[in-house]
């Protein structure tokens, strides 16, 4: 495709149709952001398991049957506010600087204004200079940063397992027989997330939605994810579970951490570190060591100095930041 191939008068915007659009949309999103590829399976799962109480819609830009851009806009289920929306806009690399992004952005503004929105958010990597220019030219302001860290487990020197002080670790897949597993981890996750300094007021996802989006997410690797258990405790909400870490595997082959944390009364004992080390050891042991050469990625917010220090001590190396931008609709 060359610039002369694309004429905006031939550009067609339409709602996404699943499952038919899952594969072409995944291909476009992966081409647009090859550092974090997705698959049709992941997009379909995401489509099927969104919170039905929250708004979400997608628009596709196509020309002559070729998909050129994807827009997603909806409520933020991590920090829900009825008037605030989250947006992602991707244009195929071969179709950029030809008006496709502008056409989708105009559609985005129409959707938000029709819904009476007062604010929108998005996030991109600080090295995405064209994307940042696009946002700033339209009134978006930087409001928050998240640090990304990566670790090559093939080169990491893992210390000996720490003393758990009478607690124990179990891989998530070994706890599948607990009929309350989902409900207990849902409660534990909410306790832990309230202490994550993400620069916004978090809201809680319903149990069924959380289980589908977290524990049943296709990327989840339960054999490499661990729960910290105190058998002397039987909390009415979390049972004996006092901490956990999740490890997921991207279609790109690398792994990424979803959550790591322990309850407040168990902190300061190196237990969060023990959880991460358990995942790393499991990676090395799986497949006769073949998985042990995998890369792990994780994100931390700047105020979370304890977790950042722990990751650095384990050998994680900082990457370019992810930057959150916000738009107030009166500036649109």
Image: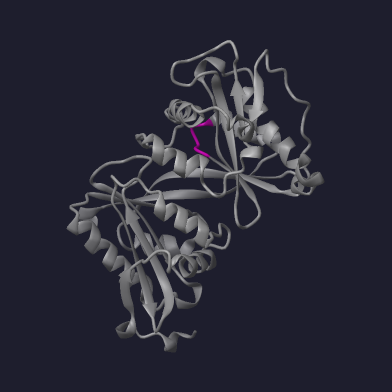
- Considering every residue shown, the one lying at the far top of the view is 232
Task: Give the residue drawn at x 54%, y 43%.
Answer: 147
The secondary structure making up most of the magenta span is loop
Q: Observer-nearest residue: 327 or 64?
A: 64
| Span of residues in magenta | 300-304
| Numbered circles on residues, count | 0
* Residue 217 position in % (x across, y down): 51, 46
Q: Is residue 75 above or below residue 312?
A: below
Residue 133, above or below 233? below
At 78% from the left and 49% from the top, the residue drawn is: 290
Considering only vertical position in the picture, is 9 above or below 228? below
In the displayed structure, does residue 113 sit left or right of residue 199? left
Residue 187, image quadrant: top left
Residue 302 on the magenta segment: yes
Left or right: residue 225 versus residue 138 is right
Q: In the image, residue 29 lies at what x, y percent?
A: 49, 64
Considering every residue shown, the one lying at the far right of the view is: 288
Q: Is residue 293 magenta?
A: no
x then y, percent, for residue 189: 47, 30
Q: Is residue 326 left or right of residue 218?
A: left
Give coordinates of residue 240: x percent, y percent.
Answer: 55, 18
**Residue closest to the eye, 101 or 288:** 288
């Amino acid at each position: 495709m060359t610039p002369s191939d694309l004429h905006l008068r031939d550009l067609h915007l339409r709602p996404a149709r699943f499952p038919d659009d899952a594969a072409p949309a995944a291909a476009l999103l992966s081409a647009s952001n090859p550092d974090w590829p997705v698959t049709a399976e992941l997009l379909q799962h995401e489509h099927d398991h969104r919170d039905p109480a929250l708004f979400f819609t997608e628009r596709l830009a196509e020309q002559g049957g070729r998909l050129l851009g994807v827009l997603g806009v909806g409520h933020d289920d991590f920090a829900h506010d009825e008037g605030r929306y989250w947006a992602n806009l991707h244009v195929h690399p071969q179709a950029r600087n030809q008006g496709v992004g502008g056409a989708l952005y105009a559609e985005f503004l129409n959707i938000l204004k029709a819904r009476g929105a007062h604010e929108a958010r998005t996030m991109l990597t600080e090295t995405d200079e064209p994307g940042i220019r696009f946002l700033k030219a339209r009134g978006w302001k930087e409001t928050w940063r998240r640090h990304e860290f990566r670790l090559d487990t093939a080169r990491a020197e893992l210390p000996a397992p720490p003393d758990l002080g009478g607690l124990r670790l179990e891989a998530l897949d070994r706890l599948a027989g607990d009929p309350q597993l989902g409900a207990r981890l849902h409660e534990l996750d909410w306790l832990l997330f309230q202490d994550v300094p993400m620069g916004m007021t978090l809201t809680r996802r319903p149990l069924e939605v959380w289980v589908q989006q977290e524990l049943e997410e296709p990327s989840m690797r339960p054999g490499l994810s661990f729960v910290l258990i105190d058998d002397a405790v039987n909390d009415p909400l979390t049972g004996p579970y006092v901490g956990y870490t999740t490890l997921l595997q991207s279609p790109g082959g690398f792994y990424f951490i979803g959550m790591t944390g322990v309850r407040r009364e168990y902190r300061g004992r190196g237990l969060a570190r023990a959880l991460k080390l358990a995942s790393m050891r499991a990676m090395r042991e799986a497949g006769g060591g073949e998985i042990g050469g995998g890369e792990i990625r994780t994100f931390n917010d700047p105020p979370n100095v304890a977790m950042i220090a722990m990751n650095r001590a384990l050998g994680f190396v900082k990457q370019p930041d992810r930057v959150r931008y916000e738009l107030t609709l009166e500036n649109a």
